[in-house]
Amino acid sequence: MIVVTGATGNIGRPLTRALAEAGEQVTAVSRHPAQVPHGTRHVVADLAEPAGLRPVLAGAKSLFLLLSGDLHAAGANPADLVGEAVESGVRRIVLLSTLGVVTRPFGTTRIAMRALEDRVRESGLEWAVLRPGGFASNALWWAGSVRTRQVVAAPFGDVGVPVIDPADIAAVAAACLLEDRHDGAAYELTGPEVITPRGQTEAIAAALGTPVAFREQTREEARAAMARSMPTELADDTLDILGSPSPAELRVSPDVERVLGRAPRPFADWAARNVAAFR
């Protein structure tokens, strides 16, 4: 059995589906009730209470670990989840980390994630670490304003990064959970091209077949909006990257193609597949 945390999100949902289609027994874990693929076991659990994961992990061979937002906050101890996996007899962990542990290792949230990576490495289990950069699905923050006003509001309109399709992250995660050849690997995951918020707006408009305007936010406006759904430290770290990406954060990584045997999908492909969210 494979346990997938964050199983109803933009990464967990396609990952759960891919594992089920591969014939694996899957336990999908999320904080709230949700629909999961046929034949998949669904469990409601809060990762902020690691002991509650113990019965979920019983009999599991592998764990995909995706932290909920509150586990990125100061005072959280996600390493306890790794301890629960070890005690439950899990053989392999695939951890969703972040590219920032390499490119900006001294940010508060990056230090905490690096410590979690180290805990996974030292656990004695088989492991793989995935370090994605920006997600294409972050564009869903704009869905409401596109539907109601045909406008995208975002900071740093002409500063781009190579955002990655979450479905590609899920595909890499599935490979790491199913194939021994990825043991001990740390993959940096990006899209195939640097794209700005203004360019993403154009791709959404093309998918819709209707004009969408772009309005540039100030950093303060963006921070206030982001802080409603994530810790302020994480919002600040994210805005630092979006506003002034380093050369390492602008680099298109070969790792998706190395794992999957194909190039990562461009943002326009993600927009076309998710266009219903913007209608």
Image: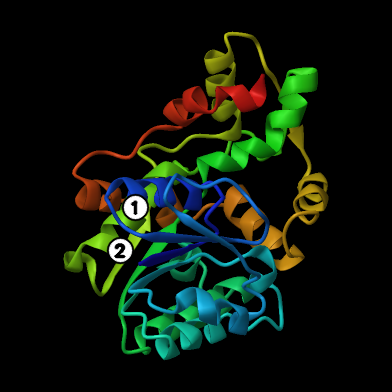
44 horizontally vs 91: left or right: right
Q: Residues within 10 Å of mark 1 (few under 14, many from 20)?
A: many
Residue drawn at x 37%, y 45% as measured from the top left: 168
Report x, y in % for residue 9.
56, 50
The residue pinned by badge 1 equals: 19
How far across and how far down the image is residue 58, in percent?
44, 79
Q: At 64% across and 34% down in the image, what residue appears?
A: 157
Mark whose residue sits in front, 2 or 1: 1
Q: Name the kind of residue labelled 1 in the image.
A: Leu
What x and y, as percent, mark residue 274?
54, 28
Residue 11 in sight here: no
Q: Which residue is mark 2?
A: 177
Q: In which quarter of the view is residue 32 placed?
A: bottom right
Do callouts 2 and 1 mark residues in contact (Cβ within 8 Å)?
A: yes
Q: Label 2 vs label 1: CA separation?
A: 9 Å
Image quadrant in which you'd find residue 210? top right
